[in-house]
Image (tube, rainbow, N blue to C red):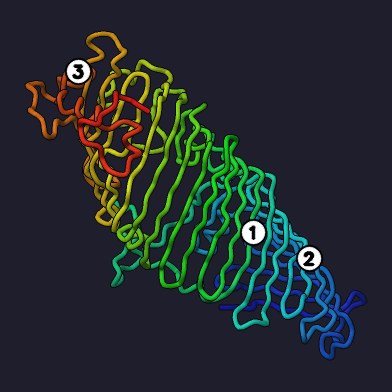
Amino acid sequence: RVEVERAVLTQGEGGLGVEAAGSVGGVPLTVSGTVGSVEGLAFGGVPLPVKVAAMTSGASATVDGAIGRVWEMKGVDVGVRAEVADPVAMGRVLGVGLPGGGPWLLEGRVRDVGDGYALDPMQVTVGGNTLAGRVAVDLGAERPRVVAALTAPLLDLTTLAESAAPVIEQAAGPTGATRAGRVFSTAPLALAGLAAADAQMSLSLDRLILREHADIGGVSVRALLADGRLTVEPIEVRTPGGTLTGSVRLDAKGDVSAELTGSGIGLGALATVLGGKAKATGGSADVRVVLQSKGRSLHEWAANLRGKVRIVIGPGRLDGEELDLGLGVMTKILALINPFHKKDKFTELRCAVVNVSVDRGVVDLAQRIVVATTKLSAVASGTVDLGREVLDLDVYTKASLSLSAGVSNFAGIVKVSGPLSKPSFSLAAKGAATTSLSVGAAVATVGLSLIGEDLVNKIIRRANCKDALAETVPPPESAGPPGGS
């Protein structure tokens, strides 16, 4: 809703002066400047000079240039500048959540091109990041078509602080609102918007920083939106050790697929992409991910997910007490059962393998996640049901045979179960005779007691890095040594 409190037009030597104050959608707005002459505005025929400034809560914008044929909006050649000094405050005024990292600044020149308009050159500064390039909109086709190309030497997302804007609660609908504790939202995705316009976009970044200590290198992305189908290809992540390439496809019906491939990726770069915090060196990795799904919400995508994930990591080193490749639960598991967790300041990794399949939202581990270090081996088995958002895993650990007597006999099983949002961790001996030791006693001995040792030994022997890569789970007699590669 537009409300005008005051509007004044004056004719002077500089042209037709404009002074106005009011609000748009409840947001206060003032406008001042000149727009040529009364004759030029009324009858056209001559270029119309425009020099106007608008101000609102924490934001301002200026337009300075000329319009050749004002009533046709042709011959447009104006410079534009818009600045938001405090994005979070502006978000509160608008009733939406905006990230911080102000000021935000947009500068460029608008010209009419064919049946549309182009902002060229264009420069956007957000949170200290500056992106430059060109954006054009063609209004002559059946659907508007946007063409954009942006480049930046650095995009640091850590400069964009979370907004303090109030949370707007959603009313429950037939699809079910996102309940507390749910990982994948049931809220409908705005898929219909894919058919509203066509687009061709490219983005090239020399460096992308996702979060603190997470510099993943250069990134290039190309995207094409046509007839309600979005294709993002190629996606390139240029790490110091190698390049990850991928693609994403999505249509207005909710069909989605994604692929990611890379070889020779450094362990540090891979851990960074996955969300790990420990400093990692060495450990060249090969990655192959092929996934597809369908649905109209994140929950339906998770429940219908199919495909395979294969990550193979060679020898490397992780500094710090946490052995975690961005898979959060690993740190908690080893803190519970690993006798070396508090003592070691780094972890020498022999190999690690993730080689799992997904069918209708159920991730089947089948002893296909293996981590082998110089001191212990760990094998995960079980399932993760993304649709029901629950997991049921057994993680078997065994000390390497090269260690001294006593510690080399260390073996244990950790049970990880419950909702994805808050799984529980406990010592267990599934499939084996229980020991007389209580969980408390096992923890008190720092996991050195034998907890289902026979079962652990069998699992470790027949599930090492080499066997985890096989297409079928190997029988016990085809076992290799613990931590084999």
Residue 18 relative to residue 310: left or right: right
Label 3's element?
Answer: helix
Q: Horizontally, is 223 left or right of 453 in the view? A: right
Alpha-carbon distance for marks 3 and 2? 69 Å
Query: How many labels were placed on the picture?
Result: 3
- Say which amino acid is labelled 2: Arg
Amino acid identity at mark 3: Ala
Above or below 228: residue 458: above
Extreme-bottom residue of the structure: 43
- Can see residue 261? yes
**Quarter of image, res 167:** bottom left
Disc 1 marks a residue whose amino acid type is: Ser
Say which mark, if any, is on residue 444. 3
Residue 400 falls in image quadrant: top left
- What is the number of the mark on residue 17? none
Element type where label 1 sits in the image: strand
